[in-house]
Image (cartoon, rainbow, N blue to C red):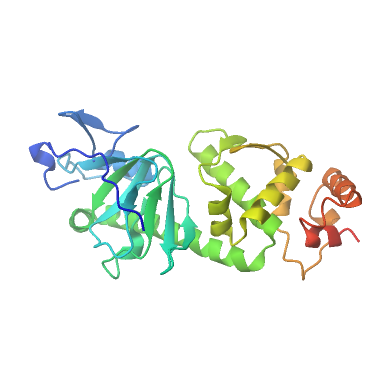
Amino acid sequence: MSAISTPARTTDLPAAALNFPVLSNDAGWRCQGSLWSTLHEVCELLHIPTPTNSHNEDALFQHVRYKAGQRIHTIGQQFENLYIVNSGFLKTVLIDEYGNEQVLSFPMKADLLGIDAIYTQRHASEAVALSDCDVILIPYKTFSALGRTYAELEQAMFSAMSRELVREQAMISMLSSLSAEAKVARFLTNLGERFGQLGYSNKVFNLRMTRHEIGSYLGLTLETVSRTLSAFNELGLITVDQRQIGIIDPVSLKALRRLPPSKSRIKVSKIVSEKMSEKVSALVSKNLLPQWSPELAGALN
């Protein structure tokens, strides 16, 4: 395992924040060259209500900046903080004894990290920056103290934690019940929806992760991910320009999210548009599709 890089963080902290680690980008204010966020700003980022009786502006939270490739926390590291992504993209991974990675998630802005360590007090996964990113540190002791003071804050934070767990459980369920095409279609549509929720384009976006990392996340090989993206491009569902994805036919792409594994052969006409069926037929006739999608090709018979 490679050495852990040291993130860019400040040690010159204002007195009011000595016990509260920083944030660093859209939200926050600067003090002595450092960026800090108040409790209200943190709650806004998480889309949870700020405690109505909160006047504690001394509760400041530190921004820490990481370069692409740096680790936010490692497996087995002592649990001290929860982390909120303020900007940038990350991945969380499990690493086996041989150094093989299993990607668990791709956190982005407003996502909460570190909840897997609350029970054991040690991190069970590793978080790595896929791009330059800005992360807010929420010391767990501080969170617990604030929760005792503001019951509604504690409840809102637990709701945010539950949201992350539900997302992970949905991913686990998907891995065992969907075809390769459905997995990739769902990944692209979900990613587009998340970009849209953050105020970015949900039709054109860049993949910060590699094809290999996508495959690890979806339980597919690198080759399957690449072939599926190429086939979607041939079908006119998306455009692919290296890491840039353009969603051209979101209706058909969303329909593909329901395609089951090969042992459950469902007529394509029931799950995709007539236009898409014609394109699939054309690819099958050219012997382009069977090597990519036996279940989709078989559904046309």
Residue 196 drawn at (x, y percent): 54, 38
Residue 267 seen in render: no
Q: Nearer the viewer, residue 144 or 137?
A: 137
Residue plotted at (55% across, 61% down): 171
Residue plotted at (38% across, 62% down): 125
Q: Quadrant of the C terminus?
A: bottom right
Q: Nearer the viewer, residue 291 or 23?
A: 291
Residue 49 drawn at (x, y percent): 34, 46
Instruction: Name the image quarter holding residue 156.
Output: bottom left
Q: Nearer the viewer, residue 53 or 229?
A: 229
Q: Quadrant of the N terminus?
A: bottom left
Q: Is residue 73 left or right of residue 201?
A: left
Q: In this rendering, is residue 84 above or below 37?
A: below
Residue plotted at (71% across, 50% down): 227
Q: Is residue 32 left or right of residue 108?
A: left
Residue 99 seen in render: yes
Residue plotted at (25% across, 57% down): 151
- Name, please, the residue furthest toward the left: 15
